[in-house]
């Protein structure tokens, strides 16, 4: 069980290709599983990131024991997002998350006021 968990959603076109680009660019720093198809898992050892493309955009989930690694992975994902997307207005809003993957983001998309 990871101590630090957060999720985010970014509405981008072609979210499935984003996961492939992340895995290609950072393959020297982590192991990447399932970059094509459903979820892509980036394994950093004691931390991981899950990228889930949907029709609306891309869901991110970052889990880590160490807070420095946790924020580092988030920054890495936001950095590559900024270099790939043309929508500079799309801010990444990270939400604290629990044990059920992407439940925080689903709740946020259903109830935007929360």
Image (tube, grey):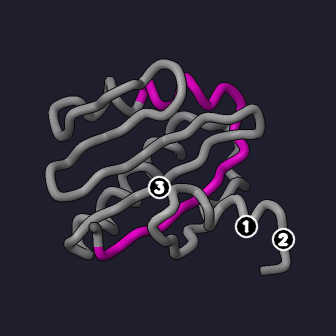
Q: Helix or strand or loop: what does disc 3 sit on? A: strand
Residues tagged 1 and 2 counted as in contact (Cβ below 8 A): yes
Residue identifier under label 3: 61
Spatial CA span between label 1 and label 2: 6 Å
Q: Is 58 located above or below residue 106 in the figure?
A: above
Look at the numbered discs 1 and 3 and tell me whether their residues touch, using CB distance below 8 Å: no
Q: Position of residue 110 (x, y in %)?
A: 83, 63
Q: Are marks 2 and 3 in contact (CB under 8 Å)?
A: no
Which residue bears the numbered disc 1?
107
Query: How many C-alpha atoms fall within 10 Å of the one at disc 3: few (<14), some, or many (≥20)?
Result: many
Quarter of the image with the N terminus in it: bottom left
Residue 111 horizontal/vertical position (percent): 84, 71
Magenta span includes 20: yes
- Of tags 1 and 3, the one toward the viewer is 1
Magenta region: which residues? 3-21
Mark 2 or mark 3, which has the lower sequence index? 3
Residue 41 included in the magenta stretch of the image:
no
Image position of 33 (left or right of 112): left
Residue displayed at 47% across by 67% down: 6
User: Which residue corresponds to the image point at 52% horizontal and 43% vertical from the top-left?
Assistant: 81
* SS category of the residue bearing label 1: helix
Considering only vertical position in the picture, is 60 above or below 5? above
Residue 63: image location, x then y, percent? 34, 62
- Separation of marks 2 and 3 at Cα, in angstroms: 19 Å
Q: Which mark is residue 111?
A: 2
Q: Position of residue 14 (x, y in %)?
A: 66, 25
81, 59: nearer the viewer:
59
Check the picture and name the quadrant holding the C terminus: bottom right
Q: Gap in Å between the C-alphas at discs 1 and 3?
A: 14 Å
């Amino acid at each position: 069980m990871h101590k630090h968990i957060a999720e985010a959603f970014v509405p981008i076109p072609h979210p499935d290709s984003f996961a492939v680009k992340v895995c290609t660019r950072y393959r020297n720093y982590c192991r990447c599983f399932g970059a094509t198809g459903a979820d892509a898992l980036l394994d950093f050892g004691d931390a991981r990131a899950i990228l889930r493309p949907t029709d609306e955009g891309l869901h991110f989930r970052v889990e880590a024991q160490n807070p420095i690694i946790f924020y580092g992975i988030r920054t890495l994902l936001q950095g590559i997002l900024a270099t790939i997307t043309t929508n500079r207005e799309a801010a990444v809003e990270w939400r604290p998350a629990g044990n059920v993957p992407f439940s925080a983001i689903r709740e946020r998309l259903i109830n935007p006021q929360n």
